[in-house]
Image (spheres, helix red, strand yellow):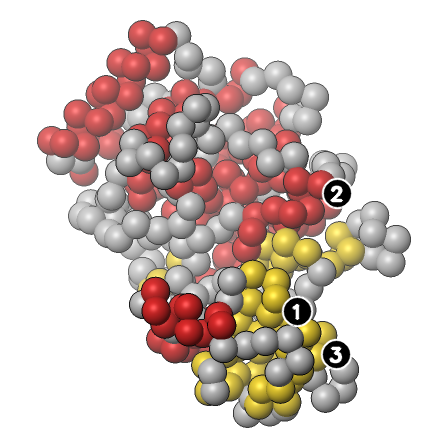
Amino acid sequence: LCEAFTSLSSSLRIGQVVKGFRDVYVVAQKLHDQVWSASNTAHRKVVLKCAPEIRLQREREILQQFESNSCIRNFIDHGNEPPFLVLEHLELGALKSSSERSFSRQDVKFIAHNVLSALASLHAKGIAHTDIKPDNILLNFNASGTRVVDAKLADCGDACDVGLQTDPRGTAHAIGAAIFRSPEALLGLKWSTPTDIWSFGATLLSLIFGRNFHIFKPPKVSADDAEFPVHVLIQQARYFGPFPLTYKSFLDEEQEKILAAIHIHIEEQCIRKPFSQVEDEELTPEDKIFLCEIMRLDPRDRPTAKELLKHDWFAIS
């Protein structure tokens, strides 16, 4: 797989012409390891994404299924030599934007509403995105660059058919970046659509605070450390814990020991800090209410995307 990625990423070069099924594209600039900007025959900007063919096929299937959803990045075309997708071009990712500026509250709510609209559509079909984070939210701004006018969910290559059941009993493969990953996914439990809701809440926290700050990022622990996921769980429990007794019904002995050790550590170090009591100039009381409803440690207690779209938080200016 690594060799495939290397081959794919090195197979495109600036100025190269590649042929899709609908149009021809000229490669303009490398944006990421397997992502390039390009232009079509009408000189409109697009994005070319290279990846193993099976992953591209999955993303294409998802994007085509939801092509009428204005909150999910548009699929335009695809090609075989090398395998690539042609995707809608948007100006910036939310991660880069939030690291450079603090979003206005209006922009934060606009982005949140669009992400939830995308998730509501995916979840209604029993599909979990599995990698909700600022990197995967793409934005366009107005002419003056002062307001977000488009916000779309991107990177559906890891989306999974999970059905409509949300019971976390069982096991599942690891998903997403650890600081945005749900507690059940960090523990290796079976996850479903509620994992996206937790990741949405973690993303919303990042957008509100901005400047690359994240409350779940463990201090002085590298993301490469094997214990990093446990330290993320500690941060989750610090702010939104303790884990409810309902967890006991679907944990094995090893997982029970992990949670017990986390709670002991938090109490011994006196580091519990309920999010509802956090005071920060970036947070309003309404923000805290909204986020506390989202960040329920038991996935069965989290509201759905459809329910969150109706929340009073969106009506408060």
Q: How far apart are marks 1 and 3 (CA)?
A: 14 Å
Q: How far apart are marks 1 and 2 (CA)?
A: 32 Å
Q: How crowded is mark 2: few (under 14 residues within 10 Å), some or many (20 or more)?
A: some
Identify the residue at horizontal 31%, vertical 26% (top origin). 243
Which numbered tag is attached to residue 29? 1
Number of the front mark, 3 or 2: 3
Up-down relation of residue 37 to residue 229 (above or below): below
At label 3, which amino acid type do we have? Arg
Identify the residue at horizontal 71%, vertical 41% (top origin). 100
Up-down relation of residue 219 to residue 291 (above or below): above
Numbered circles on residues, count: 3
Relative image position of residue 156 (x, y in whole percent): 47, 64
Say which label, 1 or 3, has the lower sequence index. Answer: 1
Q: Is mark 2 on a helix, strand or loop?
A: helix
Up-down relation of residue 91 to residue 252 (above or below): below
Q: In which quarter of the image is residue 102?
A: top right
Q: Which of 31 and 103 is in front in this view?
A: 31
Identify the residue at horizontal 51%, vertical 28% (top origin). 215
Task: Say which residue label 3 marks.
Answer: 44
Which numbered tag is attached to residue 106? 2
Number of the front mark, 1 or 3: 1
Relative image position of residue 153 (x, y in whole percent): 57, 59
